[in-house]
Image (spheres, rainbow, N blue to C red):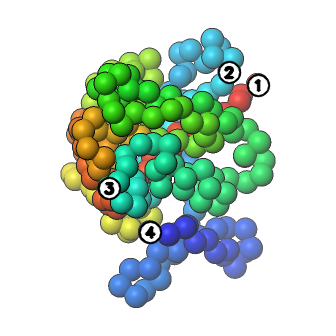
Amino acid sequence: MGELEYTLGIDGVTRYVKVNSGGTDYYYEVEPIKWRILNYITLAADGNKALILSEKVLTRKAWHTDTTSNKNDVSMIRAWLNDGLYNTTFSTQQKGLIEQTMVDNSGGTTGYGSGNINACGNTYDNIFLLSWSQVMNSAYGFSSDEPRKKVLTDYSRKLGTKEVNGFAHWWLRSPYHSGTSQVRYIDEDGYIGDKDTVTTSSLGVVPALVIDLT
């Protein structure tokens, strides 16, 4: 899957995103992304910096182009989030609200401890995927599997994003502790899976970012 391709409707304002399936182009009206504030209970303590997560799976994407690395800092999906998605989805005004964030990629955030050989250095990102430790954080509302369950947008469903019993599989940024080809993900039951192959293109993308509410 390449970059998102948008077109304007006849009103010159409404945007549509195009999906080609079986040689036929389909157009889906771009709806505002609905976000969930994860750090709601600590918002004031966090300086009114809101960590927000998309309520739905927006699209599908392979995590990386090949199986030579599952380190977040060099992943294809990280590059796409901060270029393709960032620049095609957000207006200049919206970008002004987004805080570039230091993203913790240490072994402790992956669920395998400091011995995870695939952990990498911290990165500075506008948009990112959640880590294992974040989707385990009850302060973010993840006190059970249920809050981790995600549904698809019509657009992502048409793309063929993996869906079981009405709920999607979606990527985390945390690498598996062995080998270089697998990364953790969330399944249809909200369960945190140990691994799926980085080149799998059917898993969903659920972006997270930080905005300044002051």
The quarter of the image holding the C terminus is top right
**Among the two numbered marks 1 and 2 on one chain, the one whose residue lies closer to the N terminus:** 2
**Which label sits in the foreground, 4 or 2?**
4
Tell me what residue is drawn at x 73 percent, y 54 percent: 91
Residue type highlighted by circle 4: Met
Which quarter of the picture shows residue 97?
top right
Badge 2 is on which residue?
A: 48
Distance from Cα at disc 4 to Cα at disc 1: 37 Å
Disc 3 residue crowd, few under 14, some 14–19, many 20+, Cα 10 Å = some
- x, y percentage for residue 25? 47, 83
Front residue of this view, candidates 92 and 28? 92
Residue 208: percent from the left, percent from the top? 52, 39
Instruction: Look at label 1 and name its amino acid.
Output: Thr
Q: Give the alpha-carbon distance from disc 3 to disc 1, as whole Å.
A: 42 Å
Give the number of the disc on residue 67: 3
- Please name which of the two marks, 3 or 4, marks the residue nearer to the observer: 3
